[in-house]
Image: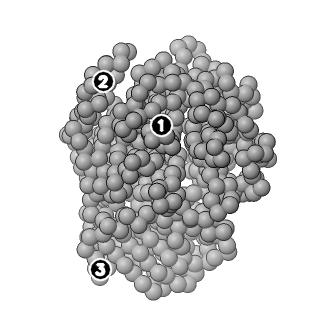
Amino acid sequence: MKKTEILTQITEAETASLHISDEKYRLFFHLMPPVGWLNDPNGLCVYRDTFHVFFQYSPEAPDGSGRKVWGHYTSADLVNWRYQGTPLVTDTVWDRDGAYSGCAFTDDGNLEVFYTGNVKETGDFDYIFNGRQANIIYTVSKDGTVFDEKLPLLTNRDYPSSYTCHVRDPKVWKQGGQYYMVLGGRKKDEHGAVMVYTSPDKKDWSLLKEMTSVEPFGYMWECPDLFEMNSRWFLLCCPQGLPSEAERYQNLYQSGYFQCEGFTLEDTDYKCHPGAFWELDHGFDFYAPQTFTDSGGRRILIGWAGIPEEERYGNAPTINEGWQHALTVPRELTFDGNMLRQYPVQELDSLHGEGLSLEENVIRAAAFDMQLTLAGNRQSVRLDDDLVLDCTDGLVTLTFLNDTGAGRTCRTARLPKGQRGIKELRILKDTSMLEFYINHGELVFTTRYYPKDVTQTPFALTGTVCRLHLWKIQKMNVHMGNLLTEYDMQKL
Ligand code: FRU
């Protein structure tokens, strides 16, 4: 297909978003695709005082069957956003079948992007061991919206022969005058692993080491992110193929981090310990998070509030509205000496509207923020007469009793450090999404749900409540621009 045809298709589909068929489940304060499908956050960064959030985007089809390109939002404050169009599309031989996930980097005054060009060769292939090209592509923007020519940096022949063709999702950073890149991969012996590359100039990359696990821990690790915080190294990744256990690994694919005891960049290969793997979110919908640091030094994480290939959830009701999936709110990451905690960035407080009371056990707002201080070893909250978050002696369960979960059933996790009760609970409710932050982000549960009436939430609570604050949340301002951005016009 010619470049112009692809672009025409995309922009036509996007224009159709102006007529999204029903707004019922559209979200107030989470980033969504203008129309169609969204998955991973990509290229998160601050560039010239502006936050950039790119995302895996397929405007053509809300069921995810279309080609993946990059969508783009920008913001000065994480609550007022502007949609910037689709700056990276599938217009070269290296990314013909998808401009897959990647990162952004800004040390030279430009916004530079490293991403995965996915190519599926025509023929009788399994696309795991053969038939797929995984190209790491580099492209530069001098203004943060328009990208120059694409340059392939690494192709299949650069990866060790022990890897299948599933290699992707570059994350780049700079340290001590050198550049580093992590890539997620699936090895031929069905081990998930991460390769660490290094470069003096961002163009010429060589393999430094491999990070895998002492014993098999899933067959593929997607979306890696490796960073140091409080003198400790953390490897974020999304292992696929972990068997589900009673209190963990209950989603189809996992998303979490290894605490890499004794890791240094200089050493050779590193083996992670499955026992040092912590899940980031225990809800039904969370995957492919990325982190970045802002100018104040905060490390902020944004995840995809979704899961790939999860058939148990059935067809999302939002498909009938012409869209599917969203990102989580930006979450500040901190290390408390034991584990990483996630908490909504403070900027979100500026969306607080009027304070609400709980008197009639119904919360009359499509979006709200509830902050509770609790006591005791047994707590339970019930929303919409269906979804129950329960904590009994340290075991936390999130259970749909009826059908607002559209196929979601139950998720379980244990409070860390032998704690038996929830002390603090924050519930962010947004029409069709919930994020529960327990004990200031020690455990997080994210889920989509589809109540019949999104404008009011029947609410019941048992347990000892010491304090309760409840605010309406106002809609974020998301400026859709002209959809056909100037850049798209130029390209056409
Ligand atoms: C994770 C993922 C990435 C890939 C992208 C494609 O959800 O599979 O590994 O780059 O999605 O959209």
The picture places residue 230, in percent across and down from the top left corner, at 64, 63
Q: Position of residue 79 (x, y in %)?
A: 33, 57
Task: Tell me the residue that label 2 is attached to.
Answer: 491
Amino acid identity at mark 2: Lys
Q: Is mark 2 within 8 Å of ligand 1?
A: no
User: Which circle's residue, 3 or 2, is located before the other in the chain?
Assistant: 3
In the rendered structure, find residue 112 and report the number of the disc placed on it: 1
Q: Residue at 44% across / 64% down in the picture?
A: 344
Is the residue marked 3 within 8 Å of ligand 1, measured from its CB?
no
Residue 280 location, x and y as percent?
Answer: 57, 57
- Residue 157 is left or right of residue 169, and the answer is right
Quarter of the figure with residue 55: top left
Q: Residues within 10 Å of mark 3 (few under 14, many from 20)?
A: some
What distance separates the C-alpha of mark 1 from that of mark 3?
A: 48 Å
Q: Is tag 1's residue or tag 2's residue first in the polypeptide sequence?
A: 1
Q: Amino acid at mark 3?
A: Ser
- The residue to which callout 3 is attached is 357
